[in-house]
């Protein structure tokens, strides 16, 4: 099988050619070219030199190899991948297509990150056993599992074990998936949860036990008698039900006694119909009061649980923020030391302060750079140096601190600088999936990536809709370009300059 990539004006294509000749009049080819299958990449055919080429549109989609190059497979990732496998196999049976012509190579399995839709290539003329392909597919996944996620490890190895069985069947994979979904951890009531946290500062170890009670969460609305565990709550509920049953039985016995006394002549003045009606009215009132009280109690309990959960979330978020800020301050002090103020070079000080404000446009979103007028900065520098004779002119760039390479916007103040500090930097507008976010509508959700190597930085377009160009030349699909100093890089309408 041969594969290559091609790009036209606004589309990216994966071009595959099978090893065997293809009958274009066959049912499978006509089904593939004339219909849109949910789990199959949209395809068109083109003849070239007597060969049939299959063009699969992969615009705005990423292969599993590129998405999980440095990321581990968690339980949600495996559910998405194996769920997509089950879905495409069911579609093969529904549309009477040969599942052996599916390509399960991770490089040719694509994911729409925003829609969470996994799609495969169906290639007539390509024949390989499904079980064999699934084994190779899981062998690719197993080394990249997140071993801190016990559910992911269990699911990954269970599917791999099923793929190795001699009597392999699709139902085995379904059974593993459904068993994993049904296996849930036991729920623990909020009132029984206690948190303990230990923080070490230098050689001093402090421990703090945080316990949540109903008085703390509802500001004294509930007293200590209402703090019950699960067994106590169940006993209380059962007691209420028993009381209700006893009340109904006593009311019934009372009515029977009154009727018996009337029939025996002990209560000749009593009207039987009136007695029964009064008894039923009182019984109905009692049942209504009981139901209303139970409904009110459940509502209060639900509100209390929401408040406890919200307070716990705020507490944990505050602790995490405090810890993160403390570690960040200590790390900056160890790496850079204190920034010395300089009256002689105020422009260099401004540069260092601006540089320390950026964190590489991480996953939490890009920080907007303050719009500073260059003419005002030059004026301040001139005024500060006017009264002092410094002698010979000094080149400021010669004393600039060395740091990571970066992409600087060609329109100052419009887009934040992108610092290339990581081995791989993903650029796009989807905050949850990118290291550097460019909030422009023409930029794709996952637009491109820049890989750091020993000999420099390599830029690759990731099937973006509007493309990536270097010095006015559009990059091809899967093409790696070695960036040079002052290269003009355009991510659609986002215009940058690369500074090494």
Image (cartoon, grey):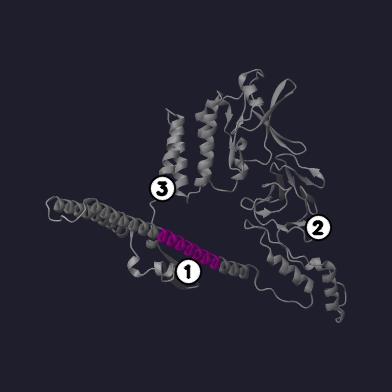
Q: Relative to 425, say whether 324 is above or below.
A: below
Mark number displayed over residue 184: 3
Q: For marks 1 and 3, give the CA distance.
A: 31 Å
Looking at the magenta stretch, what is its main secondary structure? helix
Residue 472 covered by magenta stretch: no
Q: For marks 2 and 1, give the CA distance.
A: 45 Å
| Residue located beneath label 2 in the image | 411
Residue 407 picture quarter: bottom right
Farthest residue to the bottom: give it: 387
User: What residue is at 71 percent from the left and 65 percent from the top?
Assistant: 355
* 2 or 3: tag closer to the N-terminus: 3
Please provide percent x and percent y for residue 293: 36, 59
| Residue located beneath label 1 in the image | 199
Density class for disc 3 (Cα within 10 Å; few <14, some 14-19, many ≥20) is: few
User: Considering the image in quadrants, where does the N terminus appear?
Assistant: top right
User: What residue is at 72 percent from the left and 76 percent from the top?
Assistant: 341
- Decide: marks 2, 3 in contact (CB < 8 A)? no
Mark number displayed over residue 332: none
Q: Magenta part of the protein: which range?
A: 299-323
Taking depth in this image into account, of 107 and 77 the one nearest to the observer is 77
User: What residue is at 41 percent from the left and 48 percent from the top?
Assistant: 184
User: What residue is at 41 percent from the left and 43 percent from the top?
Assistant: 182
Please provide percent x and percent y for residue 398: 80, 66
Q: For marks 2 and 3, give the CA distance.
A: 53 Å
């Amino acid at each position: 099988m041969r594969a290559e990539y091609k790009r036209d004006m606004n589309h990216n294509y994966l071009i595959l050619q099978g090893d065997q000749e293809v009958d274009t009049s066959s049912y499978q080819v006509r089904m593939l070219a004339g219909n849109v299958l949910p789990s199959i990449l949209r395809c068109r055919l083109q003849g070239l030199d007597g060969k049939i080429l299959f063009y699969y549109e992969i615009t705005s989609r990423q292969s599993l190899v590129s998405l999980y190059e440095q990321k581990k497979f968690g339980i949600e990732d495996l559910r998405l991948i194996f769920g997509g496998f089950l879905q495409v196999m069911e579609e093969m049976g529904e549309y009477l297509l040969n599942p052996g012509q599916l390509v399960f190579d991770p490089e040719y399995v694509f994911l729409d990150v925003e829609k969470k839709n996994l799609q495969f290539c169906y290639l007539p003329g390509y024949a390989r056993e499904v079980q064999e392909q699934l084994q190779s597919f899981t062998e690719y996944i197993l080394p990249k599992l997140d071993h801190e996620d016990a559910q992911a490890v269990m699911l990954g190895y269970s599917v791999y074990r099923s793929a190795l069985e001699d009597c392999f069947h699709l139902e085995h994979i379904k059974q593993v998936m459904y068993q994993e979904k049904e296996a849930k951890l036991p729920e623990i009531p909020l009132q029984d949860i206690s948190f303990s946290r230990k923080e070490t500062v230098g050689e001093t170890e402090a421990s703090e036990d945080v316990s949540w009670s109903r008085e703390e969460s509802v500001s004294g609305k509930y007293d200590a008698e209402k703090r019950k565990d699960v067994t106590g709550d169940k006993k209380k509920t059962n007691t209420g039900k028993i009381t209700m049953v006893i009340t109904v039985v006593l009311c019934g016995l009372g009515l029977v006694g009154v009727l018996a006394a009337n029939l025996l002549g002990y209560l000749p003045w009593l009207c039987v119909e009136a007695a029964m009606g009064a008894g039923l009215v009182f019984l109905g009132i009692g049942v209504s009061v009981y139901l209303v009280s139970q409904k009110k109690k459940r509502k209060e309990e639900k509100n209390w649980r929401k408040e406890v959960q919200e307070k716990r979330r705020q507490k944990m978020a505050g602790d995490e923020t405090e810890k993160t800020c403390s570690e960040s301050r200590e790390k900056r002090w160890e790496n850079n030391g204190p920034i010395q103020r300089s009256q002689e070079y105020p422009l260099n000080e401004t540069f260092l302060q601006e540089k320390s404000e950026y964190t590489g446009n991480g996953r939490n979103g890009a920080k907007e750079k303050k719009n500073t007028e260059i003419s005002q900065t030059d004026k301040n520098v001139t005024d500060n140096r006017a009264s002092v004779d410094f002698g010979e002119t000094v080149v400021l760039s010669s004393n600039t601190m060395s740091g990571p390479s970066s992409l600087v916007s060609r329109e100052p103040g419009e887009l934040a600088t992108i610092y290339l500090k990581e081995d791989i930097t993903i650029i796009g507008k989807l905050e949850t999936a990118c290291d550097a976010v460019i909030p422009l509508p023409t930029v794709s959700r996952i637009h491109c990536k820049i890989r750091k190597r020993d000999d420099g930085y390599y830029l690759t377009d990731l099937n973006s809709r509007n493309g990536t160009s270097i010095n006015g030349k559009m990059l091809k699909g899967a093409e790696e370009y070695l960036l040079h100093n002052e290269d003009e890089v355009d991510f659609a309408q986002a215009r940058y300059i690369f500074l090494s």
